[in-house]
Image: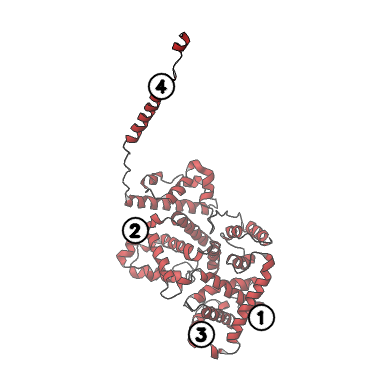
Amino acid sequence: MTEQNTRPSAIDCSESNVGIRSKKRHSYSNSLSLKKTPSPEIDKESTTSKVAQFCNRSFNAFRNALGKKVRPGANHFKALDPSFMQARGPKSAPLHTLRRSMSIDSTERTRCSIDRPRSATNTPIKMPVSEGVRLEKMTALLEQPIVDLNALRKLAWNGIPVQLRGKVWKLLLGYMPSNAVRRDDTLVRKRNEYNETANSLFVTGNETLDASLKHQIHIDVERTHPTLKLFQQPVVRGMLERILYVWSIRHPASGYVQGISDLTTPFLFVFLNSMNEINEDTSDIENRVSKEDLLTVEADTYWCLSKLLDGIQDNYIQSQPGIYRQVMKLQELTQRIDVDLINHFNAQGIEFMQFSFRWMNCLLMREFALRHIIRMWDTYIAEGLTGVSDFHVYVCVSLLIKWSEQLQTMDFQDCIIFLQSPPTRNWSDSEVEVLLSEAYLWKYLFSDACAHLK
């Protein structure tokens, strides 16, 4: 009896457990009844100002790093004002990610956050140490039975060696198969297809050609790179006219549009240079390149031009909606990055369409020297299908931001004259590299971040 009285009963144990559970429920109920602290209101103007200040400091640090030939890392961003984090809106995930990667406590992540471009698959791209290293790595890739196109894009983003540029462009544009077994047969078939089409149109005489279309193309070809001897030679002009005519009749939705002749010249120059070393002032192309090789170059140029234009064909159909879309995006980006410049444009009555239509239509072909356009196209092509339509807009906004202070001192007429004939044709190679780096940084900040453009 004594043991039974001293030992707790089953009922006593259950009551004790119930008491403990009731206390936990009471505590949990009290925690739910607490009022949440209201979120502080976001000052949109302050947020925009803080983001702009951060971007400007980022560019200064980035330029200093490039000037010292040092890869920008965490130490280059110690001077950034962290207070902009307090003004960010709740939807600024890309900026939050970028700022967090630049924090001093994440040195290793920062080492890869800014100076590594990303390919079309959003894969970070490592910057090769030197031209020689890039050439060695790219040559090894091209010798593989099946070329790794993603790895090739990573290397090509920072520039392609002259010796390999023609082959790399054909691969990245999808004209040349990555599988070495299929490569020769595909190229022969494609070249024969183009040559048969061109011969059927031109060998029998010009009587069967569309006279109006032929005349329009002929006029544009004569005005293409008038200062470069290479493109003033009759054989080169004939190649351009045939390429553009065949493309036009095979793409009736758009037909020929002024400016497409400019987009043909980088391909023609690169592929001619792959046959025999030439330059912009070469005047004896027939003596340097055989007739058979000229036919090969012409066919390759046609197919690569077709691949390029497939991604931006809405730039050249009726009403050109693609160009209008790019111009609107350029204006929206400038609005978010540099409000003062936008306000100045508005005060002067300057419309973006007045100066940027040609930037989009001709891809800055008339603003930069041909060798710099070719370097920029290395990056555009490495970016993938959206390289021309998307990344090109960030290059254009980088130009506007670069000249912002200068433009804000000009009136309407001076601004238009400056933007239609900018001082870029005499740029150095390093200035073009900085421009592409700045364009990548803007893309890193704003690409796929719709909240920043509202």
Mark 4–mark 3 Cα distance, whole angstroms, equals 98 Å
Whole-percent x, y for residue 419 in the image: 41, 68
Residue depth check, mark 4 versus mark 3: number of the one nearer the observer: 4
Q: Residues within 10 Å of mark 4 (few under 14, many from 20)?
A: few
**Tag 1 residue:** 291
Looking at the rendered structure, the kind of residue marked 2 is Asp
Looking at the rendered structure, the kind of residue marked 1 is Lys
Q: Earlier in the sequence, mark 4 or mark 3?
A: 4
The label on residue 16 is: 4
Q: Earlier in the sequence, mark 1 or mark 2?
A: 1
Mark 4–mark 2 Cα distance, whole angstroms, equals 71 Å
Seen at 47% across and 47% down, the residue is 77
Q: Residues within 10 Å of mark 2 (few under 14, many from 20)?
A: some
Look at the image and tell me whether residue 84 can be seen: yes
Residue sitting nearer the eye, 118 or 433: 118
Q: Is residue 332 left or right of residue 252?
A: left
Q: Residues within 10 Å of mark 1 (few under 14, many from 20)?
A: few
Please identify the residue farthest to the bottom as the structure is shown: 207
Q: Earlier in the sequence, mark 4 or mark 2?
A: 4
Mark 4–mark 1 Cα distance, whole angstroms, equals 100 Å
Helix, strand or loop for disc 2: helix
Seen at 40% across and 27% down, the residue is 21
**Tag 2 residue:** 340
**Tag 3 residue:** 214
Residue depth check, mark 4 versus mark 2: number of the one nearer the observer: 4
Look at the image and tell me whether residue 289 can be seen: no
Image: 367 above or below 153: below
Mark 3–mark 1 Cα distance, whole angstroms, equals 24 Å
Helix, strand or loop for disc 3: helix
